[in-house]
Image: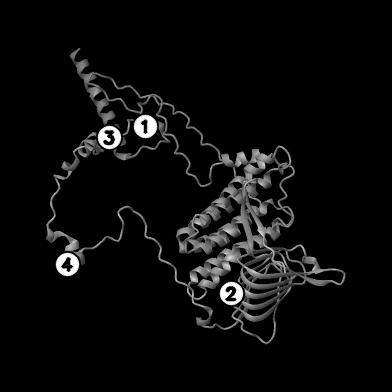
Amino acid sequence: MAQNNIHNLVTLIKRLEAATTRLEDIASSTIELPQAVPSLTATVATPSGPSSVASPTPQPTSAPAPSAPKRTPQEPLPESIEEFDVFISQSVNKYVQASNKLGDLIAEQASKVLEGFKQQRRFLLISTKARKPDITGSDMVVYQELLKPINEALMAVGSIKESNRGSPVFSQLSAVAEGIMVLAWVTVDNRPYKHVEESLGSAQFFGNRVLKEYKDKGPDQVEWVQTFYQVFRDLAEYVKQYYPNGIPWNAGGKPAAEVAKTLDSVPASGAAAPPPPPPLPAAGGAPPPPPPPPPPGMPPAIQAAPAKPDMNAVFSDLNKGEAVTKGLRKVDRSEMTHKNPALRAGSTVSDRDSSGRGKSPAPGKKPKPESMRVKKPPKKELEGNKWTIENFDKPSDPIVIEAEMSHSILISRCNQTTIIVKGKGNAVTVENTQRLSLVIDSLVSTVDVVKSSNFALQVMGNLPTILLDQLDGAQVYLSKESTSTRVFSSKSAGINVNVLAGDDDDYKEIPLPSQICSYFDEEKGDMVNEIVDHAG
């Protein structure tokens, strides 16, 4: 009986040694157990004592891993949208980079311009998937909601200009604010590229001033203007190619509101995917241990609340009367700056005011009179869509230029000069001239004359508007086609408009009023303005 017990004990010890050796081999050969073999991740029971009998460990079955969510393939973009992306990445971004180089308000305004073109890209993408909303019916609200982001960017650009009228870069801000109306081309049904070209003409009014001011001293400013102009030229070519007759929409598409909602719900491309869930423990095995707690950090500092002023103490001090100054120290004569010049010379005042109020701007320098300025050589050249004619003084022959519909013309500092504009141009700006005679065929927009004297204008064809500001003497001759021309004058005197009238088609001279009489009418409750006529 004793021999049988000893035999069983020896057999049991051998089996325990074999199991221990097996476990040591597994532990030494496997540093990190692969999750693909669930049997190796199961916990092996260790015998509790020499009397226990090792039983074979059952092979557990692993739970099926959850399948990863399938990504739906993205729908390919239409060619028109891909080309618009190229336009933004090349033309618009180049303008934004030039603006960031100048910084401050110009860079801030450029970011709003970029946002406007991004919102326009969204509008164009919706138009490729949706049918055109009924603007005259119930879809008017939907159409306005589609245009709302573009309109917000447009208003933000104009707001930056209006809130910084005293800025030294106001001309740059005005050029962008005038040209940002180009974003409205998506609402034009008939030849929208014409609207893009007209917007360029509006931007050039202030942009050309920047070119003239920084032509010889600011290459970064000149580059900025050229990159801004290039945005209009590239956009006009794009609209001519893909939207020559307006946005076609998708006749068989879904409602615009539904498409817009779908686009807004799609997550942005390139977003990081959520991490996969941790693997489930094998069946029958113990769950993985929790992660260790983070190391203890410093407890947050407790900030004492600022003591509130005791108003009772203030009033009690005020009620003391003359006794309130008893605690003040008497200043010795040697410490008084008004009696010691040496102390005044040694004292310094900080450049910055403690109140944080900025310094008042220094008054600007008055420009030199024309007689004291150095005369520059005459210039007549075409840069892009802009004609520049300046510094001509008593030329022997008239100056003739051939204008196109996209051309704007700047005439500056020309004395006793005759200029003839043939063809139909966009706009003409005249400034600081004396005895200038201007003859034009037709214009798309306006003739703007500023700070000139003894000016003469003859219109052979059609002209919508004439703007006269700070003129001393002017003669305007209108043709039969331009009898409906609007003339706006301010701070001017001695202006006569000559129109063809009567059977003989003779010119009739009509002076423009330069004196206004104003008085308050009690019955109307408002000011009444009357033109003063001088009879006799």
Closer to the chain start, of discs 1 and 4, is 1
Real-space Cα distance between discs 2 and 4? 54 Å
Closer to the chain start, of discs 1 and 2, is 1
User: Residue 235, percent across and down?
Assistant: 64, 60
Tell me if I can see residue 506 in this picture.
yes
Real-space Cα distance between discs 1 and 2? 91 Å
Label 3 SS: helix
Quarter of the image where the N terminus is located: top left
Q: Amino acid at mark 4?
A: Ala
Number of the label disc, if any, that sits on residue 209: none
Real-space Cα distance between discs 1 and 3? 15 Å
Give the crowd class for mark 1: few <14, some 14-19, many >=20 residues within 10 Å: some
CB within 8 Å, label 4 to label 3: no
At 30% across and 22% down in the image, what residue appears? 54
**Residue tagged 4:** 342
Closest to the camera, between mark 4 and mark 3, is 4
Label 1 SS: helix
Real-space Cα distance between discs 1 and 4? 89 Å
Q: Residue furthest top?
A: 1
